[in-house]
């Protein structure tokens, strides 16, 4: 099949860790690569956000990235991109009028808008993955939510226009039902993990204390790093490495890094909290392997690839029981679940795990097992393809014949 991925802000080639570059970038990159491995042709359309980018890049994995000129060729926060989606959609339409894909797959709601415009005019069927839903964000962030005011209404429209909505976890299926999306039009396909990169064996980053906790994510308040820092005050002999944000040299200017550092100072744990800044894909496994426990304590989480990466490295996970984390982390099997924003509860669960090396190994091994069985990108690609085939039934016969 000829597949067009649309990912307006999340470029699969971008460095990860800053405010607008995380799981969606990984998802688009890995899913595209896996679809190419399965014999399909994939083009990713993403907004051109620098003058240095060539119009088109052929990746070593075999998919193409087209940098779509829409809005200024510089970084623009994703919550300010909506005014440029009309232009993005027109460019897509021109592209697809000349060379129509069999199916398009939009990632995030704004890509859905641009895709709906181009798909309607070129007769291209499309699937939608929201990655995050405006209603959920609003519920948790309230006044701090900087999304455009129209987001929720537009998400409902996109969900109606997409031939299929691909949810990444069971919690999202409930949210979509509440938005009025018929269950029959929803496929559930999780994100995956690179099982060859994230492995239990391999180099291990050096540590300074007896126990180490690692927390990874974009440095935004909803990731709940403050809960982990607060818990650390009750966990002697333990250090916490916070991974994410800009490169280490620029951390001092990052408002969330400053807020977290001030909290660590206030609690008297600053010497035991290390802010690693942005860490490359290459160095991430060694850091995860150096942890006794990987801690993921967001207020909410649409999916959460980090716990999968930890599990694939054979490291137990303590996570908040929210969103996708309730699908990936199995309480008492691959890790432990806690309520969000409850540092005392987190302390109790961490004490139990840090005090029991055998239990950590059992959870870690079960985590690797679960990642292998359910979350390879090849499996995710095969399940995603099944959703695409529902949009182009005439292709089912060809696929079956193969
Ligand atoms: N990540 C990274 N370097 C960093 C911070 C994060 O490579 O410095 C990666 C992390 O390993 C994971 C992704 O960014 O693959 C974050 O995805 P997740 O789904 O956990 O969170 P999201 O960004 O979607 O909220």
Image: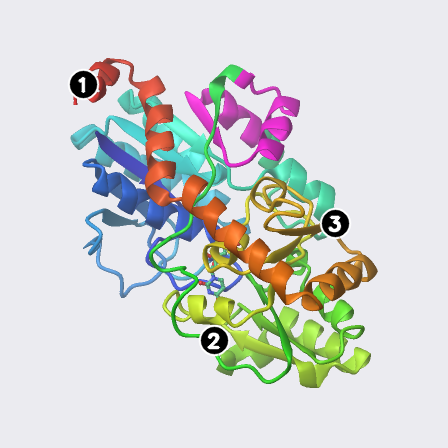
What percent of the width, then of the height, locates residue 383? 38, 30
Q: Which mark is residue 143?
A: 3
| Quarter of the C terminus within the rendering | top left
Give whichever of discs 2 and 1 has the lower sequence position: 2
Instruction: Judge whether residue 305 can be spotted in this image.
Output: no
- The residue to which callout 1 is attached is 398
Nearer to us: label 1 or label 3 = 1
Q: Check the image and report above or below for 122 versus 24.
A: above
Q: Is mark 3 within 8 Å of ligand 1?
A: no
What percent of the width, then of the height, locates residue 8? 40, 46
Residue sticking out furthest to the right: 344
Give whichever of discs 3 and 2 has the lower sequence position: 3
> Which residue sits at x=40%, y=60%?
199
Find the magenta span and give its range.
Answer: 154-183
**Is residue 158 magenta-colored?**
yes
Instruction: Judge whether residue 71 can be spotted in this image.
Output: yes
What percent of the width, then of the height, locates residue 114? 40, 35
User: Tag 1, which secondary structure?
Assistant: helix
| Labels 2 & 1 near each other (Cβ < 8 A) | no
- The residue to which callout 2 is attached is 247
């Amino acid at each position: 099949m000829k597949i067009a991925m649309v990912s307006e802000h999340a470029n699969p080639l971008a460095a990860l860790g800053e405010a607008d570059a995380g799981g969606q970038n990984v998802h688009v990159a890995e899913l595209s690569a896996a679809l190419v491995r399965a014999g399909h042709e994939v083009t990713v359309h993403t907004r051109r956000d620098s003058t240095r980018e060539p119009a088109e890049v052929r990746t070593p994995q075999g998919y193409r990235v087209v940098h779509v000129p829409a809005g200024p060729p510089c970084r623009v926060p994703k919550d300010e991109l909506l005014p440029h989606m009309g232009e993005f959609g027109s460019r897509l339409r021109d592209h697809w009028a000349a060379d129509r894909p069999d199916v398009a797959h939009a990632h995030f709601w704004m890509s859905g808008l641009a895709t709906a415009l181009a798909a309607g005019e070129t007769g291209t069927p499309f699937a939608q993955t929201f990655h995050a839903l405006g209603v959920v964000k609003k519920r948790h962030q309230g006044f701090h939510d900087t999304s455009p005011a129209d987001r929720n209404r537009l998400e409902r429209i996109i969900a109606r226009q997409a031939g299929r909505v691909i949810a990444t976890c069971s919690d999202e299926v409930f949210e979509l039902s509440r938005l009025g999306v018929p269950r029959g039009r929803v496929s559930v396909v999780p994100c995956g993990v690179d099982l060859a990169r994230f492995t239990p064996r391999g180099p291990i980053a050096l540590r300074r204390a007896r126990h180490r906790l690692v927390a990874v994510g974009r440095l935004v308040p909803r990731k709940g790093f403050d809960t982990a820092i607060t818990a650390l005050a009750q966990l002697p002999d333990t250090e916490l490495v916070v991974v994410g944000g800009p490169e280490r040299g620029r951390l001092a200017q990052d408002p969330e890094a400053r807020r977290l550092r001030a909290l660590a100072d206030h609690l008297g744990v600053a010497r035991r909290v290390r802010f690693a800044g942005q860490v490359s894909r290459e160095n991430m496994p060694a850091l995860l392997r150096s942890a006794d426990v990987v801690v993921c304590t967001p207020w909410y989480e649409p999916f959460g690839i980090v716990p999968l990466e930890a599990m694939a490295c054979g490291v137990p996970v303590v996570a908040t029981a929210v969103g996708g984390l309730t699908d990936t982390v199995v309480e008492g099997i691959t890790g432990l679940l806690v309520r969000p924003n409850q540092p005392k509860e987190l302390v109790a669960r961490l004490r139990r795990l840090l005090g029991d090396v055998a239990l950590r190994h059992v959870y870690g091994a079960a985590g690797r097992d679960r990642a292998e069985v359910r979350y390879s990108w090849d499996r995710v690609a095969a399940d995603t393809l099944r959703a695409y085939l529902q949009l182009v039934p005439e292709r089912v016969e060809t696929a079956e014949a193969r």
